[in-house]
Image (tube, rainbow, N blue to C red):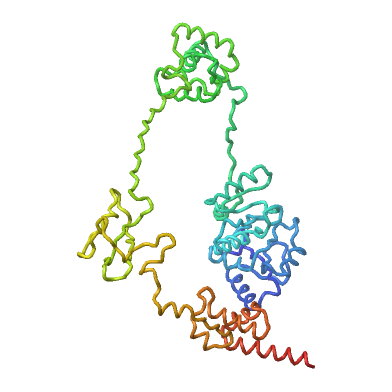
Amino acid sequence: MPIFQDANGLAIKFFIQKDIAQEIQAELCEVVASLGGRVEAKVPRQGYVLVQPGTAEEERLRLCWMAQDRPQRHFVPYTYVEACKIAGMQLKQIFVENGLPVKMHIHPSIANINARTTLSQRIMHSGGDPTSSPQSAKIILADPNTEVFQHLVKTYQSIPDKHVESYLWVKKCVEKGSLVYTPLIYKNPGGRRPGEERTPFTEDDERHLCEWIAAKIPYKQTGGRTGNRLYQQLCEMIADPEYAWVSRHTWQSWRERYKKNAMRLDAMIAQIVDQKKPVPGEQGQYGYVRQDEEKTKRPRKKRPKPAEQNLHKEEMIIGGINADSAEVPVIVFDASPVKSGPSTSRAFIRSSPAEEELEDGEDSEEWAVRIGNEPPPKWGKRPASEESEAQKPRKRIKSNDADSIEGTSLDPGVHLIDRTLQEIATEYRFTLEEVKEFYDQCGEMERTKIRFHKMRQILSSIGES
């Protein structure tokens, strides 16, 4: 039996949107005819209207011809014909309610573009509208493997006629041929159901409870009898055969039983305590824990101070003190770290006979020291040649003489470039900041000098005119 024929063997009617390309229309007519259908020139009362989604003509056709009193007239994209041919069957319009398409929203949690496109086409081929917003959509399709899916379920489950479904739900509905929502199941909200009997407390229950409290908190003034942890520990003993009676009630019920009958149960606990007479702080009582062992404090060992606190590096004297030489001894500091232990900095190794220590009373005119107003020793006097050079007046360096600048050692605190820029600023009567700014831009000293020379000439000519 051909795909596009009804149960009575009649051809299903199709209408094609007029502004679709002629090549596509010709192909659609050929495929529809080959599958047993018939293309009409006018919109049929029962049948399919093949449209191009997203166009103005499609919107006009829907406004003019879509109505609830014509539920057998369906609007589908023109790819519907090819989809039916591939499926080998006529795709039912299951996403339609009261003659109108069911509005759906594809959530961004379905991130794959191809999956979103395929899902959208499958919905449209089955009569649905996948372009609705989350607020107006009746069904929200999302990825169940993401955290946002459960958030959407909690958000919309209390809103009537609003459903959150997995993207796989569309395929299941198409395969079943009907619109079936995921069923709701009853989840017990907790508490006792109406008509259900509670497990009553017996005298044995109260006796066991009093024995437990008397063992854990024998004296009420210590506090803790109405806390949660005491009764939670009681229910944790359920695995012990001696505490099998604990399973009759929850820890909340045991706590409420004591709390509502505290005066009567306190008297029973006091009788048990008088019989056993436990000592406060006994092992096993609630609130008492084993004291941590006291840690013995180890005395801190004081590090021995080095013989010389100010000497952090070993010293080694290189060279010797010779009676015939006037050279000053040179002290070289070793960069190696100071080793712990007795200082050896004073133990100098003597490598030549000239390095001999002077005996007490031995005269050393070479290293004599000036005392009071006495004349300086021989080694402290400057040679005559140096004195004559020191007395000569030094020549002043001309700022505009480039050769003198190069030949004379400048002040190490001022760079040669800064000195030259200062000279340019002074010579052409500009500020140093202006000269430095232009030099930083061009990076050429000669160009800077020519620039400010020309500027001074221009300014001078303006003043004369």
Q: Which of 125 and 402 is in front in this view?
A: 402
Placement of 347 over or under 40, stated as above or below: above
Q: Locate residue 6, reporting x and y percent.
A: 62, 60
Placement of 193 over or under 305, stated as above or below: above
Q: Locate residue 302, reporting x and y percent.
A: 35, 40
Q: Quadrant of the N terminus?
A: bottom right
Residue ID at (36%, 69%): 378
Q: Nearer the viewer, residue 20 or 377?
A: 377
Rendering quarter of residue 117: bottom right
> Is residue 462 toward the left or the right of residue 176 in the image?
right
Q: Nearer the viewer, residue 47 or 150?
A: 150
Residue ID at (33%, 48%): 306
Q: Quadrant of the C terminus?
A: bottom right
Q: Which of 310 and 45 is in front in this view?
A: 310
Placement of 231 over or under 58, stated as above or below: above
Rendering quarter of residue 261: top right
